[in-house]
Amino acid sequence: MNEIWQGLIEAGRLIATLDADLIEISLRSLQVTVTAVLIASAIGIPFGAWLAVKRFRHRRAAIALLNALMGLPPVAVGLFVYMLLSRSGPFGVFGLLFTPAAMIVAQVFILTPLVASLAHQSMRELWADYHDLLISLGATRRQRIAAIVRDGRRALLTAALAGFGRGIGEVGAIMIVGGNIDHATRVLTTAIALETGKGNFALALGLGFVLIGLAISVNWLVHTLSRTEGGARW
Amino acid sequence: MVDASILPLVVSAARVRRDGRDIIGPLDAELAAEGTTLVIGPNGAGKTTFLRMLHGLERLSGGTLRWQALEREVRRRQAFVFQSPVMMRRSVLENAAYPLILRGRTRRQAREAAAGWLARIGLAEAAERPAHVLSGGERQKLALARALVTEPDLLILDEPCASLDGRATREIEALLVAARAAGTRVVMSTHDMGQARRLASDVLFLHRGTIREAGPAEAFFEQPQTPEARAFLRGDIVE
Ligand SMILES: Nc1ncnc2c1ncn2[C@@H]1O[C@H](COP(=O)(O)OP(=O)(O)OP(=O)(O)O)[C@@H](O)[C@H]1O
Ligand SMILES: [Mg+2]
């Protein structure tokens, strides 16, 4: 119990003193995950909506595959991206390994199936509602997707937030491709892993509380913003 | 109307198959260019399926629909009002404007035209409210406005007044009469024989997926030719 208290106090101290390292790694955590969520949403949301609207032969299999991809172990994704980006790998020439860009790439792989799958689920319900009407009105496939994405934007925001929650707390993949290099690729989760390994439980717990606080505030912020925009009516 | 109408329509030996049986057909029918056709018949006769088939929402498993225009044009120039109206998760005004947006009108043109329709159906004040807070009658009126905003040649309605009270029903009927006067061909189903008598210029009587009787409304209601139609009009159970 004592250690938890010390952790809370340490977290309070880190925040109160605006600890430079803490701010740096928190911002990097945000930068990596927010970028990854934006990319994953830009791919996953249209894809999920397309999957809801389009009828094709292997649709069921595609959905099952998507749901399976959602459960990909981050460590495996990390290893895969590592091999792609390593010097001898196909994208080695870009020299991305052990940079935040590599961490973003790994998180995009992890988050896109999640966002796409959640988007697909909510879009499917909306499409069931809209199907007859939009067919009757002669909407093209593009227009159908646009309509359900627009009118289902609250559910899609929730999907993106779920992606953020998964990404901000993820450690396995970014540890492998980022390397947890101080002042370069260290983020909250990898720092926690490191400090715990070193036996600095108070600092690790402090960082943990900051991480939780960050996750909650981003969720709260996005929900508040979307409510003032008027989306709450739906 | 600038272009010639998509009507008349000739339906020949049309069939719609579900679960290994024909729920429609083989069915022959003609829709003349003018008038208001009421589609009546007992529950399960195939009215909804027939109307959806006309609109192109059901795939034919046989037979043909012969319109006076190409397929693309045909869909564009008709509109369908479903028995339970689909309200998009948008404002009342945006619902009414949506078909025009789909047709490439600017937002402003679409909203202006839609606002005009809202005024006509008495929903101008509700324009900015989310459509799903409307009452059943208001929803149905909105669905009708959304159908008419594109000025279709042919308007198809599936029991638009089911579960509406007398006043709401009269309002819908008045809008349909006005639409017809403006040159829109109306085809609708109903279980309300009073409504059928008030609106119909001609009648299609459906039974077990086929048309048992078709003709001018007056003759049909005065002197139905088939025993099924006679039983139906008497209010008996039609076997
Ligand atoms: N998707 C479907 N699968 C199987 N059978 C169907 C399907 N849709 C309709 N049917 C059957 O087709 C027949 C005609 O149905 P339809 O809804 O067209 O009748 P209706 O005349 O509109 O009836 P109601 O007056 O109750 O609205 C019914 O026997 C119905 O059970
Ligand atoms: Mg029906």
Image (tube, rainbow, N blue to C red):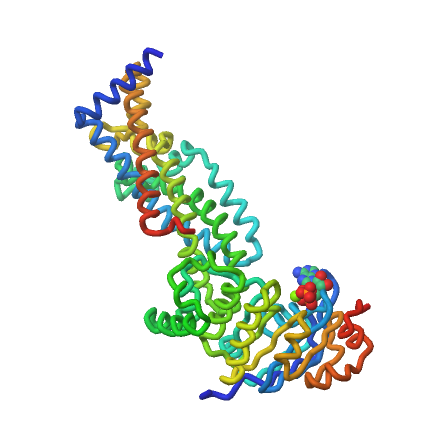
**Location of residue A136 with respect to A58 vertically, above or below:** below
Q: Quadrant of ligand 1?
A: bottom right
**Location of residue B40 with respect to A220 vertically, above or below:** below
Tag count in the figure? Answer: 0
Q: Position of residue A190 (x, y in %)?
A: 31, 27
**Foreground: A110 or A145?**
A145
**Location of residue A16 with respect to A202 vertically, above or below:** below
**Foreground: A114 or B11?**
B11
In the figure, residue B209 lies in which quadrant?
bottom right
**Foreground: A186 or A225?**
A225
Point 34% across, 47% down: residue? A227
Could you tell whether B187 is left or right of B232 in the image?
left
Q: Position of residue B179 (x, y in %)?
A: 51, 80
Point 46% across, 71% down: residue? B121
Q: Position of residue A138 (x, y in %)?
A: 49, 70
Q: Position of residue B8 (x, y in %)?
A: 60, 86
Location of the N terminus of chain A (image quadrant): top left
Outermost residue on the front side: it is B167
In the figure, residue B58 lies in which quadrant?
bottom right
The reply to whether residue A177 is in sight is no
**Foreground: A114 or B234?**
B234
Could you tell whether A51 is left or right of A110 in the image?
right
Point 30% across, 22% down: residue? A194
Point 73% across, 82% down: residue? B220
Could you tell whether A105 is left or right of A117 in the image?
left
